[in-house]
Image (cartoon, rainbow, N blue to C red):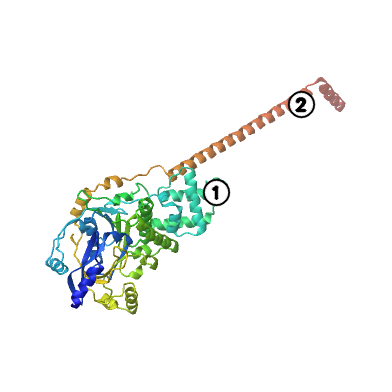
Amino acid sequence: MSDNQAFLEHINEGYKTKGDFLTMGAAMYNGETVTDAHVKIPLKTLNRHGLIAGATGTGKTKTLQVLAENLSEQGIPVLLMDIKGDLSGIAAASPGHPKIDERHEKIGIPFEAKDFPVEILSLSDQDGVRLRATVSEFGPVLLSRILDVTTTQAGIISIIFKYCDDNKLPLLDLKDLKKVLQYATQEGKKELEKDYGRISTASTGSILRKIVELEQQGADLFFGEKSFEVQDLCRIDENGRGIINIIRLTDIQDKPKLFSTFMLSLLAEIYGTFPEQGDSGRPELVIFLDEAHLIFKEASNALMGQIESIVKLIRSKGVGLYFVTQNPTDVPDGVLSQLGLKVQHALRAFTAKDRKAIKLTAENYPISEYYDTKEILTSLGIGEALVSALDEKGRPTPLAATMLRAPMSRMDILSDNELKALLKKSKLIPKYNEEIDRESAYELLNEKIEKAEAEEAKAAAKKEREKLNRGSSSSRSKSRRASATEKAVIKVLTSATFIRGALGVLNKLLK
């Protein structure tokens, strides 16, 4: 048996599957593509999460595109984070190219150009379905972790949420939260101290500064109504294909805190609302996190712990998470250890640090008798990658240097007119893009403060009137006393006895 035949059998046996699967491409051996040595990923393992990594320009985005298309074909909805702004072309069919045909001939798969059902979403003022969540939906624990506050400050945030629950004050956006924090140490200080204990002005000031920092990254656009319902990510079109939801994030690359806030909120909401399903035959939703290092860039230890917990638990809800980044070391070890599928594009060894990273990356993959992993990591071409997955029994598949299939959709963005036409067909924009600013904690507390101030002013005016009235009564009393005294003096002066006495004195003086 030739080496090529032995390799073909090695790959076909290692990637054999009985259920539904996605075909990534064909394995390569000695630098050549082995036709029909198909690298197949079982659908039932796609909730075990994954990683797509590689240097800039090696084809990570196209791999993401291929996976999203094939998932959609299988009726599985997808959520993509489009940070670079180059994924909207999934909504249009590929124009084709001779090189694509040549690639697919080597792989042993016919190429078919297709467009796919796409929904454009947005976290900001960009066109698309607006994604929002209320402060109340975050809850005090998650919000405290995002703000990276101290234990004492986290306790104050919990008190604020309890006070608002007890007094029916909806916390919808950040201005509501700021208003309640200010009220707790000013007008409502005595009220809160009575029922919840003393709240430090220094602590609330620190929390307010953290909220302002979040606002400066655009979080005021994210917090509010109408809240996005995560079930709307799981829609299927009229042809049975999963909708590919693309979140446009081109304007938040320099706002990692907003990005991690949104992602943690979304994952927490999905985990809290999706039903438990264990290891079923297919995932309910697959999420691709492009530029994944942004999620971890400024995350505190508490926030990192929360992310790791969700990654471990969310697969039981039928949700797969796929991190797309330049280097596997961008992803924390606690998350990396949970990833079943790994697609590693080429890495570049320009520095000693790069060579060290390549060595560490190679150690994350199964040992292969057919490849020197460290060497092949630097020699892969564009659209080629090392693939390691899980078979249907959860066992690691053989390492395969893979010639990846080409996307069926356009490998470019939509024009402005095409994007407008796509947005016009959206069924979610009418549902979520109406701005709502109903009465919440901010308005209710302002009303309460104004009422209290009016009552204070009324009480002060009443007190002043009473004071004036008491002054007037005192004057009248004095006047009456003075009048009585005058009358008594006049009576004495005009009495006959007084006159006779006075005349007697005058007679003596005149003699």
Numbered circles on residues, count? 2
Q: Residue at x 31, y 49 (%)?
A: 231
Q: Secondary structure at mark 2?
A: helix
Residue furthest front in the image: 1
Q: Residues within 10 Å of mark 1 (few under 14, many from 20)?
A: some
Three-letter code, disc 1? Tyr
> Residue 350, percent across and down?
29, 78
Quadrant in the picture for the N terminus: bottom left
Residue 484 lies in what quarter of the image? top right
> Residue 327, percent across and down?
32, 70
Q: Residue at x 29, y 77 (%)?
A: 374
> Residue 394, percent across and down?
32, 64
Q: Which residue does the numbered mark 1 point to in the structure image?
A: 196
Viewer-nearest of discs 2 and 1 = 1
Q: Is residue 459 above or below residue 191?
A: above
User: Which numbered circle lies on residue 489?
Assistant: 2
Res. 9 in view: yes
Query: Which of the two discs, 2 and 1, labels the residue nearer the N terminus?
Result: 1
Three-letter code, disc 2? Val
Viewer-proximal residue among 412 and 334: 334
User: Which numbered circle lies on residue 332?
Assistant: none
Viewer-proximal residue among 500 and 511: 500
Q: Is residue 377 above or below residue 127?
A: below
Left of 424 or right of it: where is 458? right
Q: CA distance from mark 2 to mark 1?
A: 69 Å
Left of 371 or right of it: where is 495? right
Residue furthest top in the image: 496
Q: Residue at x 43, y 51 (%)?
A: 139
Res. 126 in view: no
Q: Secondary structure at mark 1?
A: helix
Q: Residues within 10 Å of mark 2 (few under 14, many from 20)?
A: few
